[in-house]
C-alpha cells in the first residue's frame, strides 16, 4: 500500500505520519508539503526508508499529480487558518487533489474537517452553535473555506470512497480514547486530542466504517 499525506507539517499531520509509520512500517508514506523543513528532523528518508518527502504547493496541478502516482490512500490533515485569503484556497486545492486522484485511479480519501461542515445526522447543540458562530464571525474566511471543503469532497469527489473526520476543539492531550457521533447526539464532547485524530484516521484505512460519511469525533 502507498499513502499520500497532506498537511503533514502541522501538529495533526506530524502525529498522523508517525502513526502511519508505526502501523505500516513496510509501506510507502509520501508526504507532500509546501514547507518540508518544518518536519521534525527524525522524519526523513534517512531514518525511515519508506518515507518519501515531496516539496509542492496545493496550487501546483502537475506536482500533485506526480505525488499521487501509485498512491492507494490519501490522508489529509489540512485545515484552514486565521488570516487566510478569502478565496477558499484549501477547497480549491482539494479540487486539484480530487482531479489527480481520479486520473490516477486512487479511490480512498480521509480528510480532516470541523463541525462547521454540516452533516444530516446533526441536531441542535447550544455549545456547538456557539463555537461555530465564533469561528464564522471571527474567522470568516476560514469558516467559508472549511465549509467549501466539505462541499467539494461530497460533490466533486462523489465517486471516491471519502471520509470527512470532523473535529471540535483540538488539544495536545495523550488521550486516544474516542467517542464517535454527531453534533447534538448527547454523546460527544467539545474537544478531541490530536493523537486521537491521528489514531482514528489510520484505523479507518482498514476498518472503512465511515465511507461516504462525516463522523464527529471527540475524546472519551
Image (tube, grey):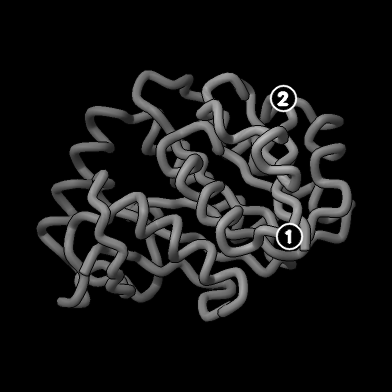
State whether residue 149 is above or below residue 205: above
State which tag comes first along the sequence, 2 or 1.
Answer: 1
Point out the image quarter for the N terminus: bottom right
Q: Position of residue 215 (x, y in %)?
A: 40, 69
Q: What x and y, as percent, mark residue 77? A: 51, 45
Q: Are marks 2 and 1 in contact (CB under 8 Å)?
A: no
- Report, in whole angstroms, how far the alpha carbon at label 2 lies from the one at label 1: 23 Å
Quadrant (top left/top right/bottom left/bottom right) for the C terminus: bottom left
| Tag 2 residue | 55
Front residue of this view, candidates 100 and 193: 193
In this rendering, would 65 be left or right of 124? Answer: right
Horizontal side of residue 5 vs 107, given as left or right: left
The part of the image, by quadrant, that contains residue 83 is: top left
Residue at left offset 35%, top offset 76%: 121
Nearer the camera: disc 2 or disc 1: 1
* Residue 133 in the figure: left or right of residue 110: left
- Residue situated in front as seen by the camera: 129 or 167: 167
Q: Secondary structure at mark 2?
A: strand
Up/down of 6 relative to 2, above or below: above
At a point 79% along the width and 47% down the height, the residue shown is: 99
Label 1, on which residue?
26
Amino acid at each position: 500500500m502507498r499513502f499520500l499525506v497532506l498537511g503533514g507539517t502541522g501538529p495533526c499531520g506530524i502525529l498522523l505520519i508517525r502513526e502511519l509509520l508505526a502501523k505500516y512500517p513496510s509501506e510507502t508514506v509520501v508526504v507532500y508539503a509546501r514547507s518540508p523543513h518544518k518536519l521534525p528532523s527524525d522524519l526523513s528518508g534517512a531514518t525511515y526508508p519508506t518515507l518519501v518527502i515531496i516539496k509542492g504547493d496545493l496550487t501546483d496541478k502537475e506536482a500533485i499529480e506526480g505525488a499521487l502516482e501509485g498512491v492507494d490512500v490519501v490522508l489529509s490533515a489540512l485545515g484552514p487558518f486565521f488570516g487566510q485569503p478569502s478565496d477558499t484556497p484549501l477547497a480549491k486545492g482539494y479540487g486539484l487533489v480530487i482531479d489527480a486522484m481520479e486520473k490516477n485511479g486512487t479511490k480512498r480519501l480521509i480528510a480532516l474537517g470541523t463541525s462547521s461542515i454540516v452533516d444530516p445526522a446533526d441536531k441542535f447543540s447550544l455549545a456547538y452553535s456557539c463555537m461555530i458562530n465564533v469561528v464564522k464571525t471571527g474567522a470568516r474566511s476560514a469558516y467559508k473555506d472549511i465549509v467549501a471543503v466539505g462541499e467539494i469532497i461530497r460533490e466533486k469527489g462523489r465517486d471516491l470512497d471519502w471520509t470527512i473526520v470532523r473535529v471540535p476543539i483540538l488539544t495536545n492531550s495523550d488521550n486516544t480514547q474516542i467517542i464517535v457521533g454527531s453534533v447534538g447526539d448527547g454523546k460527544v464532547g467539545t474537544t478531541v486530542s490530536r493523537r486521537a485524530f491521528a489514531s482514528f484516521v489510520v484505523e479507518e484505512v482498514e476498518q472503512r466504517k465511515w465511507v461516504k460519511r462525516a463522523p464527529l469525533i471527540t475524546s472519551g
